[in-house]
Amino acid sequence: MTDGRPVGDRALTGIRVCDLSGQLAGAGATRYLAAFGAEVIRVEDPATRGGWDIVRGAPPFVDERRGIELGGCFNNYNVGKLGVTLNLRTERGRQLLAELVRCCDVVTENFAAGVFAAMGFPYEVLVALRPDVIYVSNSGFGHSGPYAGFRTWGPIVQACSGLAFDSGLAGLEPAGWGYSYMDHMGANYMAMAVLAAVLHRQRTGEGQWVDMSCTEAAMTLTGTDILAHTANGRPARAPRTVHSNRSPTGTMAPHGIYPALGDDEWIAIACRSDEDWTALGKVAGERWAADRRFATVGGRLADEDELDLLVGRWTGGHDRHQLAERLRCAGVPAAAVLRPAERTGDPELNRWGMWPAVEHPAMGRVAVDGIPVHLSESDWVIEEPAPCLGQHNRQVLGGWLGVGDDKLDELARQGGV
């Protein structure tokens, strides 16, 4: 998004990031930094056509074409970055990375613990290259403890942290989200960590190593479950009754997602009090809504299975949007359950800049995610697409590090860049 303000006025202008991260947990974090003005140099492997980032060239695609430059997800998570290729299995590739580290404020990666050190770049080497460097490593379990050597993916992190258990439904296995939720949330925590370290360096002149664990980040998202267990020994829910649609506090019923008219149409309803229940009953006008068993929250919770069945039969005969509006007018919290794609046509969100478009050299003009915050004086800008593989080798390796065109051509022939 841009309002005509010069790009140089963004909040992180002047910060340069050497980014070896990939997928979503790392690339998503540096995406935020780039949008707010940081100069992010995305380092990739030329020998494996992108190498450690399996998202490059992966779906979704804009049309029938396929290839490493046509992955929609990679473009979405790498907008606004510069792209260089370095073969870190070669001595010259490692030398060039070392030179790049010297001229960057921040180095980021989300390899498994110890992988970057095994490449020849432990924290001690980074500090020797640049004493005030900020090094941020984002792995599944961090660099210490009994699980440090384990490799993870978003769904594994969700299982290890307790999040997957909390998302289950009664009688079914823990559900998860169908995608790597913690890759996205891990990116948010990683971006926050970078900003905290940058602020610390501005105050003290000191760099530091930020060792981050996505599993520990996930544990902070389990709501009150850990507190309830440590404070009074209470489980998240009674054994064998995990039901993430229901309120775990024992104070609200009905509380959940109910079927609506049509195929795979749903409505969310939450009755916070007996007054909400009375209001819902007036909207429903059904005999069960006047049943004395359900007059109090205690009675509704005692027969919650039957209550949900009755409410679901009623909601199933109504349009989700119309019924949600009727309930809201009566003071009952309710909303139609929307598919993500339904939000993209919201004119207010479009005006807010949630889906800016970029012109990609291979894909053409495509929409990408915006940033869900706005700064009045130094807002984000997303105007440039993700880099093609090695697109900025001459700008960065040549212009910044002084490698001549002939030498770059030679290195490219040898597979070094």
Image (cartoon, rainbow, N blue to C red):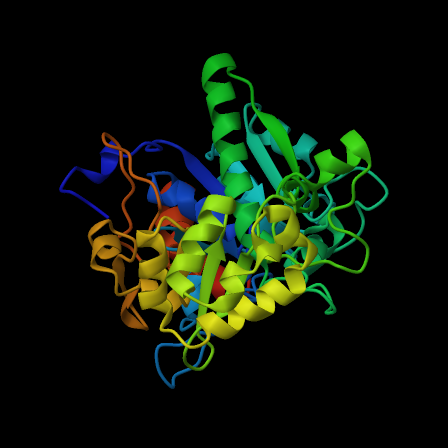
243 vs 54, nearest the viewer: 243
Residue beneath the point at 34% across and 44% down? 35
Quarter of the rendering containing residue 124: top right
Query: Is residue 58 something that shows in the picture?
Result: no
Farthest residue in the left direction? 4
The reply, left or right, for residue 205 in relation to residue 347 is right
Farthest residue in the top direction? 204
> Taking 223 as reference, is 162 above or below it?
below
Query: Is residue 185 something that shows in the picture?
Result: yes
The reply, left or right, for residue 257 in relation to residue 140 is left
Image coordinates for residue 40, horizontal then vertical, percent: 42, 44
Image coordinates for residue 248, horizontal then vertical, percent: 65, 47
Residue beneath the point at 75% across and 59% down? 241
Image coordinates for residue 18, horizontal then vertical, percent: 49, 42
**Count of marks, rendered view:** 0
Image coordinates for residue 48, horizontal then vertical, percent: 58, 68
> Taking 59 as reference, is 358 above or below it?
above
Quarter of the rendering containing residue 280: bottom left
The reply, left or right, for residue 76 in relation to residue 143 is left
200 vs 226, nearest the viewer: 226
Farthest residue in the bottom direction? 64
